[in-house]
Amino acid sequence: MDENSCNTPRRQFLKGLGAAGMATLAAPTLASTSTGEKWDESYDIVIVGSGFAGLAAAVEAKRQGAAKVAIIEKMPFFGGNSAINGGLYAAPITPLQKKEGVTDSPDIMVADQLKSGRGVADETLLRHVAENAMEGLQLCMDAGAEFHPYLQQLGGHSVPRTYQTTVSCGAGITQPLYKECKKRGVSLANRTKLIKFIHDDSGRVAGIEVATGYYYQRDKAEGKPKTIRAKKGLIIATGGFSQNVMLRMAQDPTLTPEVGSTNAAGATGEALLMMLRLGAIPVHMAHIQTGPWASPDEGGFGYVSNYSIYNFPHSVAIERKSGRRFMNEIADRKTRADAELKNRDDQGNPDPPILITSYKHGIAHPSAKKVLKYGVGWKYDTLESLADEYKIPLDPLKKQLDEYNEYVKTGEDKQFGKSMDKAKGKYMEPPYIVVRLWPKVHYCQGGVMINKSAQVLDSVTAQPIPGLYAAGEVTGGVHGVSRLGSCSIPECIVMGMTASRHITGKA
Ligand code: ADP
């Protein structure tokens, strides 16, 4: 976990891109029966994957009195893709909402998510997560996670309800949870990869076989295979499949290897495929989300994503050809990503739009200095120099900014109906910061179907597969067509906790 900082996994991710792009995954074997099996290790609860969902499940299992709990992780570092995400956590009815005078409720949060999910999200699961999101946030805080003392209003959210870690990335949660796991005596094994489910004669998933001494880059295990018994339950928390180009292209052929991804290298989805072989129900596999806040000028999630997520409410996104805004800067992710992808030159090649922010407001976010330092964002003293650099027609651009400043004054965006609450008093004035925008593959809304207790459902019987639970991005259908930003962490934490509570009989 020492390696688990915001930057180290990202370096690993960059190094791992080649291997992931080639998708050299060994085919998983079918489950075998445990009759006569002598287990190498035995635990009450075994968790596969060490992102938000896996770590929260382990902490909660211990809090609920499980004696022996283990996490296995195939990568050399713990924290998964979670450690390099934005560390943004949405919850209704929180202390910060009280402090900032925001009226909110689980109903309002669920309504926002259903709208973004375009009619196919799972209302029951969304409601369960919203109702327990504050408790999940508290679990993170109790473990030592620290958050900025203000709320953000992200795209598609009707009110400010998003906390962000002070380090502005997910490691601000995974590291404290990891330490909490160690403190509570959870067994943690890295370079250990799930390769097979083992079930008993009744059909219950009784444990797993793992490869030890696993080296991701070479897709090779140097240690001996091991069998691990999961006496009370097995929780699969192995994340999404954004880095498995073959699998994501099978769902959406436009997501070719050239389309960047914000995800860690290990997000390759083989445990999801193993669960499908076992009989789990695939849901919404083709709904793969691209992040509209990403930059084409850096790899992965980078610095710009966090910077622009914070700044969108008081910035303008401009199409270079016309010098005009082309979207509501805080619409849901799919709406914005689709709008950005329409920015093309005359030959149809990508012509990334730009996000313009007044320097004095943009610089307030901790990522802003890095954006400027590492040359993925730029400062301009005048609108003239900015227009000149990006070959934007100056007069329409000037007119656009004047119009926008009028919306700031009146609190009403006549062009796109953007909520101007967080833009109050924040006029567009020089000097400016500019970043370029182009969507990257970010999140798989698809995965296996679970019920409200995080049990994986069988495609033939529609009943829970005995002994098998799943939580986090490996599950599907929760968010529908488009997940709202900052709603993944609460889902992972709450559903990880839910799985452990159900297994320990505390649900
Ligand atoms: P979530 O956000 O849903 O909690 P993450 O993507 O953050 O998920 O974490 C999932 C973790 O699971 C990653 O660290 C990944 O390396 C690990 N993982 C994925 N597949 C396997 C596997 N077959 N065996 C062990 N660990 C796995």
Image (cartoon, rainbow, N blue to C red):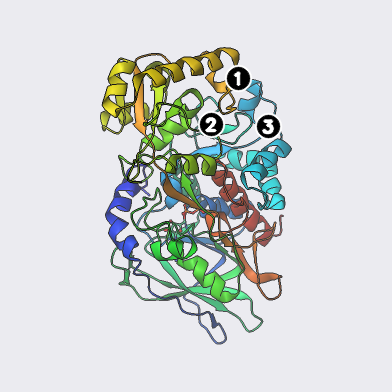
- In the picture provided, is 352 more to the left or to the right than 72? left
| Residue 36, picture quadrant | bottom right
Which of the two discs, 3 and 1, labels the residue nearer the N terminus? 3
Determine crowd level at label 2: few under 14, some 14-19, many 20+ residues with C-alpha closer than 10 A.
many
Which of the two discs, 2 and 1, labels the residue nearer the N terminus? 2
| Vertical arrangement, residue 323 with respect to residue 38, above or below | above
Q: Are marks 2 and 1 in contact (CB under 8 Å)?
A: no
User: Quick one: SS at disc 3?
Assistant: loop
Task: Decide which of 101, 314 is in the foreground and name it.
Answer: 314
- Please name the residue shown 66% across and 35% down the image: 92
Residue picked out by circle 1: 412
- Please name the residue shown 28% across and 59% down the image: 18
Amino acid type at mark 3: Ile
| Vertical arrangement, residue 318 with respect to residue 456, above or below | above
Which image quadrant: the C terminus? Answer: bottom right
- In the picture provided, is 233 more to the left or to the right than 181? right
Residue picked out by circle 2: 328
User: Quick one: SS at disc 1?
Assistant: loop
- Please name the residue shown 40% across and 58% down the image: 243
Relative image position of residue 189 (x, y in whole percent): 42, 61
Number of marks in the rendered image: 3
Amino acid type at mark 2: Asn
Measure the C-alpha gap from mark 3 to mark 2.
26 Å
Which of the two discs, 3 and 2, labels the residue nearer the N terminus? 3
Residue picked out by circle 3: 93
